[in-house]
Image (cartoon, grey):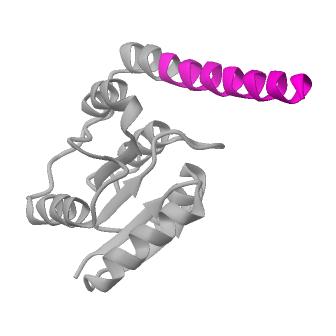
Amino acid sequence: MAKILIVDDKSVNREFLSTLLSYGGHSVLEAADGAEALAKASVELPDLVITDVLMPIMDGYELVRQLRNDPQIANTQVIFYTASYHEREARSLAASCGVHDLIFKPAEPEQILATVSKVLGGSPTNQETPASTEFDREHLRLLTNKLVANVNAKTQSGLRFELK
């Protein structure tokens, strides 16, 4: 079966995918962020990377950009595994960096397995490095929106705490 690298900053998400894919006979590696994943991919040469999009240190988009810049792992297939409320942005940026398959959290095991099978069954395509200016603009917008949402959530939490 395939060697699959799972990249997510939440250990529960990594464990879920690892268990599911290991049960299916795949060899699974894990990384907590894009930088760790890039280092592992360079050594382990996975057949597939399944990565969260928004992570600390190096996010999924930058991970794909770095993968595509390394000739040894440039053609590695990638699936984005991200929260469904980022669907529109994720699809747009995924397409711009050559990622054609996305799984939105939460996902049923059958859907995950079907997507993995589809990607692994397809022939590897020559992946392109994303166009820099437009990709950077969209990437920055997505990260800024996530940061604003986190700040708003923390502010609301603080207000509730002060009212008690």
Residue 97 appears anywhere in the view? yes
Q: Position of residue 147 (x, y in %)?
A: 63, 24
Q: Is residue 156 left or right of residue 122?
A: right
Residue toward you, 8 or 69? 8
Q: What secondary structure is the stretch in magenta mostly built from? A: helix
User: Where 27 sits versus 93, above or below?
Assistant: below
Q: Residue at x 22, y 82 (%)?
A: 1
Coordinates of residue 161 in the picture (x, y in percent): 86, 30
User: In the figure, 24 relative to 105: above or below?
Assistant: below
Region rendered in magenta: 141-164
Residue 125 image offset from top left, x and y in percent: 14, 49
Taking the magenta stretch, the answer to whether it contains residue 148 is: yes
Give the side of residue 157 with respect to residue 20, left or right: right
Q: Is residue 58 left or right of residue 6?
A: right
The answer to which of 44 and 79 lies nearer the viewer is 79
Q: Residue, x 25% and y 82% (percent of image)?
A: 24
Q: Quadrant of the C terminus?
A: top right
User: Which of the pair 138/76 is nearer the observer?
Assistant: 138
